[in-house]
Image (cartoon, rainbow, N blue to C red):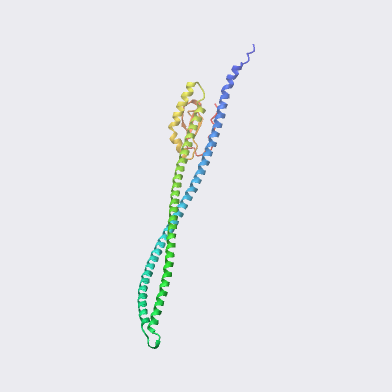
Amino acid sequence: MAPAPPSLLSRLGQILPWLVAGAAVVVAVLAEREARVWSDRADEEAARCDAVEQDAMDELIAQQRACREEKDGLLTEHRQAIDALRAAWEERERIRNANMRLEVEKARLAGAESILAAADTPDGAPNPLLDEVRRLRGEIEAQQAALAQADAQLAAAGAEIERLGREKRKLARALDTANLSVAEAELAREEATREIKRARESAIELEWDRFVLDTVQDHCWLGTRWRRNKCKETLAASLLQNKVAWLLCRLEDNATPHVLTAPASERPAAEAQLLLDDGKDSPWLVLCDHSLGDEPAPAPAAP
C-alpha cells in the first residue's frame, strides 16, 4: 500500500524552521548594515565637528591676539598723547608768564614814552631816547603777537589731542567689547565641545544597546518562551559584565567587538570569551580584534 502524501501542515512544519532561520539571518545582516551606516555617519560628523572646532579655536585665538596687540598700541599712543598734552599745557603756561612780563615792560615803556614826549627838545631836534623807547615798545608788541599766535596753535593742538584721546578711549572700549565677545565665543565653543562629547557618548551607548540587542536576537530565538527568556537574561547579563572592556576596545583601541557562534568546547579565536554554553551554537565574544578594525562583524551562522 502506497504511503499517504504529507499534509500541508506537515510540510509547513518542515519548512517553517528554515524560513525563520533565513529571516533571522536577513534581519541580522540588515541590522548590521544599518548600524554600520549610522556609525560611519557619526564618525564623519565627529570628524567634521573636530575640524570646525579647531578652525574656530584658531580664529578665536588670532582675534584675541590681534585685539590685545591693537589695545596695547592704543594705550601706548594714549600715553604719548597725554605726555604731549601735558607739554602743551606747560608751554602755554610759559607763554602766559612771558606775556605778563612783556605787559609789565610795555607799561613801563609807555610811561617813559609819555614822559619823553612831553619833554621839550632844543630847536625841535629829534629825541633819540624817545625813538629807542618806541622801537622797544614795537618789539614787545611783535613778541606779544607771536606769543598769542603760538598760544592759539597750542590751544588747537591741545584740543585735537583731547579729541584723539576720546576717540582712542572709544576704540579701547570697543576692543574690550570685542575681547568680551571673544570670551563669550570661547564659552560657546566649550559648550559646543561638551555637547559633541555628550553626543558621542550617547552614540556609543546606542551602539552598545544595538550590539546587545542584535546578539540576543541572533542567539535566543529558538525553543519555548521560557527557554528564550532565560537565554536572553543570561546572555544580556554576560554581555553586561564585559561592557567596560567593550567600551575600551571600541573607543581607545578602535577595534570592532563582535560575537562568533561555535561549539562551547571549541574556542573559535584566541581572544574569544564564552558568553553562554548553548551546545554547538554557543555565542563567543571577541573584543579587541585589530584584524577587523572598523570592518563590519561577520553575520551569525545559520542554524
The location of residue 256, given as percent across then percent down, is: 50, 37
Look at the picture and state if 38 lies above or below 220.
Answer: below
Question: Residue at the spot x=53%, y=36% of the render?
Answer: 38
Q: Work out whether residue 134 can be spotted.
A: yes
Q: For the view shown, which residue lies furthest in the right direction?
A: 2
In front of the other: 183 or 125: 125
In front of the other: 173 or 258: 173
Look at the picture and state if 190 lies above or below 97.
Answer: above
In front of the other: 174 or 229: 174
Q: Work out whether residue 296 can be spotted.
A: no
Q: For the view shown, which residue lies furthest in the top direction?
A: 1
The location of residue 284, given as percent across then percent down, is: 48, 31
Q: How many marks are shown on the rendered structure?
A: 0
Q: For the view shown, which residue lies furthest in the bottom direction?
A: 123
As drawn, is 48 to the left or to the right of 101? right
The location of residue 253, given as percent across then percent down, is: 47, 40
The location of residue 126, given as percent across then percent down, is: 40, 85
In front of the other: 55 or 188: 188
Q: Give the quarter of the figure containing the C terminus.
A: top right
As drawn, is 25 to the left or to the right of 158? right
Question: Residue at the spot x=40%, y=63% of the render?
Answer: 85
Q: Give the quarter of the figure containing the N terminus.
A: top right
